[in-house]
Image (spheres, rainbow, N blue to C red):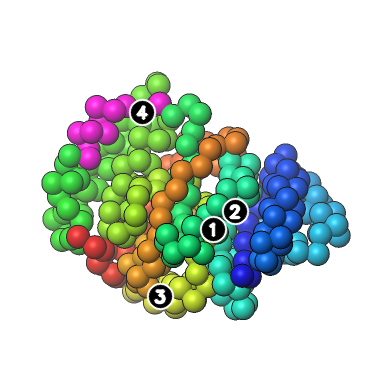
Amino acid sequence: MDIRIFGPAFNVGKTIVTLIEEFADVQQVLKRKGHNLQVLLMNDNSTDNTGKLMDQSAKKYKWLEVRHNATNLGNSANIIAGYTWGAESDADIVGCMDTDGEHSPYAMIRHISMIERGVCDGISGSIIFPDHHVDRKAIEKTMLEINTLGTSGNEDVLKKALEIMSQLSAEVFLCDDHNDRNMMRFWGRMQSTMAGVDGTFYIQSPGYNLHQRHKVAEALVLFENYRRFFAENTDEPFPKWGMHGVFIYLLSVGTGEHIKAVYLECFGKSPNRTPDKLLLQANAANTHSMRLLKFMPGKA
């Protein structure tokens, strides 16, 4: 089996070498199992030593390819570029992994085995945070309301869902004892329900994915149609964030891929976990969820 994994990288000099060395371990294990692993790391115009460290490792490992972006393209553009790289190959599985140290490539071995054994067609990974404090009463109240609303794509349902989302966002960001997990659990639950994903992925970190290449190719076609639909139906700029959730949705609803949500230990704190970036990600999720349900109604 041929496997292609890509990882966008921006200012991850503190974590990138560890990630690459773990990929090296995984490559050896997969090789013994008869698999071939190729990895593409995409330096998104980093301002630290990320690019230099990646180039040094590429000289060491033949399975590693490095790409340097002339300008900072952002999350969405890099994810689409990475999936395109994989879809245009002869690989059996195409996947992505964030490079900020939260995910470990070691998990790939068992998840590739799950796809081989037919447990699922694809994997979407959610990290479990060591400091996973949740306002359970707020979550339970919100989930009851969302479960009552359903996910039919009805305009009134969407407006009510966004109203609840805005209230929860305010609670999360204004509370002294908050983190982003409350909000992301909410939207992750709603998105995975809409998409029919087997299990719940938190939109904050589905940055670990493994999918069948032909399904990825189909989803890329759907994405181009969605991007046109987005431009024709709103004056808003296409968000730079939220692409993991969009692509999972297109894969599950659009191509019928059976995606299994899996849970991963968190090995570090992402530099993207700042209040301003979390808010950008939440707003992107709101925007995409509204447009996606109109473009391609989810599963009730």
Q: Which residues are magenta?
A: 133-143
Residue depicted at 63% across the width and 49% down the height: 105
Report the amino acid beneath label 1. Answer: Ser
Q: Identify the image quadrant of the N terminus.
A: bottom right
Report the amino acid beneath label 2. Answer: Ile
Q: Nearer the viewer, mark 1 or mark 4?
A: 1
Marks 2/1 in contact by CB < 8 Å: the verdict is: yes
Marks 1/4 in contact by CB < 8 Å: the verdict is: no
Residue at image mark 4 = 134
Alpha carbons under labels 3 and 2: distance apart: 29 Å
Q: Nearer the viewer, mark 3 or mark 2?
A: 2
Residue at image mark 3 = 222
Residue at image mark 2 = 109
Q: Position of residue 223 (x, y in %)?
A: 43, 72
Residue at image mark 1 = 113
**135 is within the stretch colored magenta:** yes
